[in-house]
Amino acid sequence: MSSAKSLSQKCVREKLLLAGGAATLALSSGQSAGAAIVSAWATPIGPPPIAGSSTDWDLDGDSTADFSLSNSGSSAYFGEVNGGRVVQASRGVASGLAKLSAGFMVGSVMVTGHGFRPSADKFSVTFNSNIGTIGTGTQAWTMGASGYFGFKFTSGPNTYYGWAELTLDPANNGTKGYGYTITQAYYNDTPGAGIAVGDTGATVPEPSTCALALLAAGGVAAYKGRRKRAAV
């Protein structure tokens, strides 16, 4: 009897801990507490609607810009700032965002033909409501569609790798010069660790002792019920 009581008390404690954890996550502004994969700050984000202006994108909230999104009036630009760089295909030949598939590994070592420029680059993403020099041959990007790109940025002596989703406004929709939005972005907060495109850090929690005990109790009850029916 004392054993059953102890288990019951443990279940109550676990429920309270779970409730407390849920409350902590709810207060964390969308950041994953203690997780390796975290959501980047300030998303969704896009170039400002005012011609001749720009917006800094600070992915980790350390008050240092990693990228810059600007609107010239006829073209929308994406600029690499400080240690921020994007994955480019045929590095040194192509300029712009390489459109990546889900599962692509972004890190210090990537599929041959993809890499980061050693120096900062700035390139147009849209131009007069048409695709710009987002990449040589447009890198398969099309207006009105979404896709993924990879990036890295630095904070102090550390380098972090991540991925983002970019959505281009439909052509001729009146948003010339600022027609794209970075809808979501995630990065691995372990310095130097890679990340798979599409990974949001979501995991399935392991069953607790309490849950396993309840499952076992349910199985015993079902077994006894079957025996009683068989006896009748």
Image: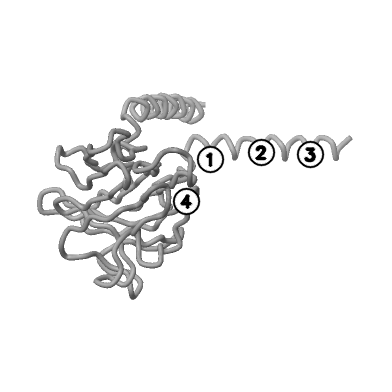
SS of the residue under disc 4: loop
Q: Residue 100, percent across and down?
A: 41, 61
Mark 2, residue position: 220
**On screen, residue 182 above or below 2:** below
Residue at label 4? 143
Say which amino acid is labelled 4. Answer: Met
Q: CA distance from mark 2 to mark 3?
A: 10 Å
Please tell me whether mark 1 sits on a helix, a strand or a loop. Answer: helix
Q: Earlier in the sequence, mark 3 or mark 1?
A: 1
Query: In the image, residue 158 lies at what x, y percent?
Result: 15, 54
Q: Indicate the amino acid at tag 1.
A: Leu
In the drawing, what numbered circle is on residue 226? Answer: 3
N-terminal of the pair, mark 2 or mark 3, is 2
**Sequence order check, earlier mark of 1 and 4:** 4
Q: Is residue 24 left or right of residue 11?
A: left
Q: Earlier in the sequence, mark 2 or mark 1?
A: 1
Q: Residues within 10 Å of mark 2 (few under 14, many from 20)?
A: few
Q: Which mark is residue 196?
A: none
Q: Which circle, 2 or 1, is nearer the viewer?
A: 1
Q: Secondary structure at mark 3?
A: helix
Q: Give the residue furthest to the right.
A: 232
Q: Amino acid at mark 2?
A: Val
Q: Which residue is mark 1?
A: 212
User: Of callouts 4 and 2, which one flags the residue occurring earlier in the amino acid sequence?
Assistant: 4
The residue at 35%/45% (across/down) is 185
Q: Nearer the viewer, mark 4 or mark 2?
A: 4
